[in-house]
Image (cartoon, helix red, strand yellow):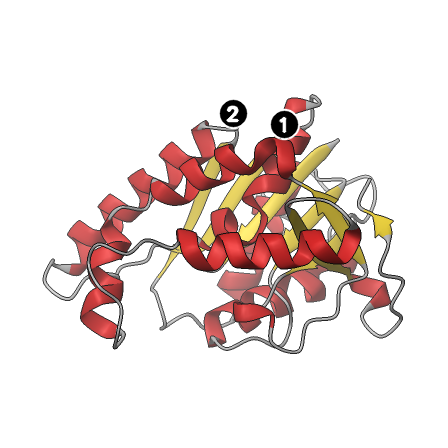
Amino acid sequence: MNILAVGAHPDDIEIFCGGTLAKCAARGDKIFCCTATNGNIGSATLPKDEIAAIRKKEAAKAASLVGAEYICLDFDDELFYEDVNARIKFINMVRHCQPDVILTHNPHDYNPDHELTSKIINDIEVMLPIAKIETEEPPCPKMPVIYYFETEKGLGFIPTDYVDITDHFETKKQMVLCHESQKQWMADNYAGFSVDDTFIEDMVITSQYRGMQCGVKYAEAFIRCNDAYRVTPYRMLP
């Protein structure tokens, strides 16, 4: 299959679905990783263009660990709004990837960029095969299946699907660690976060918790788009 992961910022994809991408890549699926924004406010000290370049490089490095193509739509971090241009850029990007499955943010999350990314992906799903909506890339032959990945700290998130990532957890960890620039940013902006900390502790706890729910060591959890209000928690993502 073609698997497309769409995150709002560099590092979202790796944290929320890196293990699933690694598992899919290992079985031969083609992987695409797209970030809506360039992460250009992800430093308290560096100029916006400089930190954006660093973060895109980090995201590309992380994607390369699973052989994925990395795409950045280059919207400004936290100043990302939907208009005709944004919608067309998203449609064109998805058509380039021709995905069978899209993994993206939950519609209800703590960050407006997360929520808007999810909204646009949901809104354009039915538009992807329509030839009269013209983009550089050709229309998709069918609508992809959409899955929402974990919310921050899992708040309000009741999965419909689990993916056993036990054999690919180390790859997920290495993908997350590619985002070296964010350790200092977290220390500068969040009380109690030291520069020596990484994203790993929260990721381990969440992966163990989801693994415990479905009977494996480490798992990632998803909600199938059309099942957002119908919980069948032990069906596994294909």
Could you tell me residue 63's position as x and y percent?
46, 34
Q: Position of residue 72 (x, y in %)?
A: 42, 47
The answer to whether mark 2 and mark 1 are in CB contact below 8 A is yes
Q: Is residue 78 visible?
A: yes
Give the quarter of the figure containing the C terminus: top right
Vertical placement of residue 19 versus 37, above or below: above
Which mark sits nearer the N-terminus, 2 or 1?
A: 1
For mark 1, does the 10 Å Cα neighbourhood hold few (<14), some (14 to 19), or many (20 or more) residues?
A: some
Q: Nearer the viewer, residue 97 or 32?
A: 32
- Height in image: 188 above or below 59? below
Between residue 8 and residue 227, name the one nearer to us: 227
Q: Residues within 10 Å of mark 2 (few under 14, many from 20)?
A: some
Seen from the viewer's position, the closer of residues 91 and 122 is 122
| Tag 1: amino acid | Ala
Residue type highlighted by circle 2: Gly
Q: Secondary structure at mark 1?
A: helix
In the image, taking residue 220 as reference, residue 111 lies left or right, namely left
* In the image: residue 93, left or right of residue 9: right
Q: Which residue is mark 2?
A: 67
Measured as percent of width and height from the top left, residue 134 is found at 65, 49
- The residue to which callout 1 is attached is 25
78 lies left or right of 226: left
Which SS class for mark 2?
Answer: loop
